[in-house]
Image: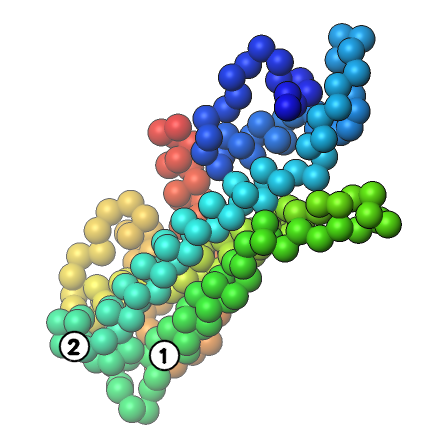
Amino acid sequence: MRAPGRRGRTGPALVPGGVLGAEAEGCTDNPVFVDGEVLHGGNFHAAPVALASEQHLLCLHQLAFLAERQLALVLDPAHNGGQPPMLTPTPGPASGFAGVQLAATSHLGAIRQHGYPASLTPVPTNLGNQDHVPMALNSANAVAGALRRAWWITASLFLAVTQLTHLTGSAAGEGLWQRLADGWTPLGSDRPLADEVDATARLIERHFTSVQEEHG
């Protein structure tokens, strides 16, 4: 079946970004008129959007999982070069990054829980007129929510590494790492860190987005 507006083209590369771009730019109502011809696309239910979104979510989960596991290693004296547990200068009286790690682990769990494929949940509706509704928007919304959680997990890791360099007296590095070291107050006594994690997430998101745009 030919999709309206794509005649004479071989179509985008079969990768999630290409599929989503083609669907966003395409005309997929049913039917449509093209050059005086009536075309029945039958693609208004946007199943490709769900399938492509789910591929994004699978990749996103892997990255979030790796970041959460790296965070666990940074906070563990058995793996961080013998630094204090949870990277607090006063283990016992203070909890350091314990709350941050618990939140990161919870975010990872939420990504998994909300990542159930919408393409496995099509149902008929509208008196059977719509006999295959793939819930594509649900899948796209799940990716959006998971992406925000993944940035929080990544920010938690970046702040923990910044705290580790403070405790060890190591050089912060250059670029983004230096910006983190300059703009963040090292953790001495316990304080709420949720806002700082969120601000750091936005900082690194802007950084990597600009790098991606610069290098295509």
Q: Mark 1 or mark 2: which comes first in sequence? A: 2
Asked if one can make out residue 195 in the rendered structure from this viewpoint, the answer is no
- Rendered image quadrant of residue 104: bottom left
Q: Is residue 36 visible?
A: yes
Q: In the displayed structure, would residue 212 be above or below residue 79?
A: above
Residue 25 appears at what percent x and percent y? 63, 26
Task: Report which residue position mark 2 lands on.
Answer: 78
Q: Amino acid at mark 2?
A: Ala
Observer-nearest residue: 178 or 136? 136
Residue 178 lies left or right of residue 104; in this view the side is: left
Q: Which mark is residue 8?
A: none
Relative to 8, 164 lies left or right: left
Percent coordinates x, y for residue 147 in the rendering = 50, 53
Whether pointer 1 and pointer 2 mark residues with C-beta atoms closer than 8 Å, the reply is: no
Q: Amino acid at mark 1?
A: Ala
Secondary structure at badge 2 equals loop
The residue beneath circle 1 is: 98
Q: How is the image coloured?
A: rainbow
Q: Please provide percent x and percent y for residue 99.
A: 41, 78
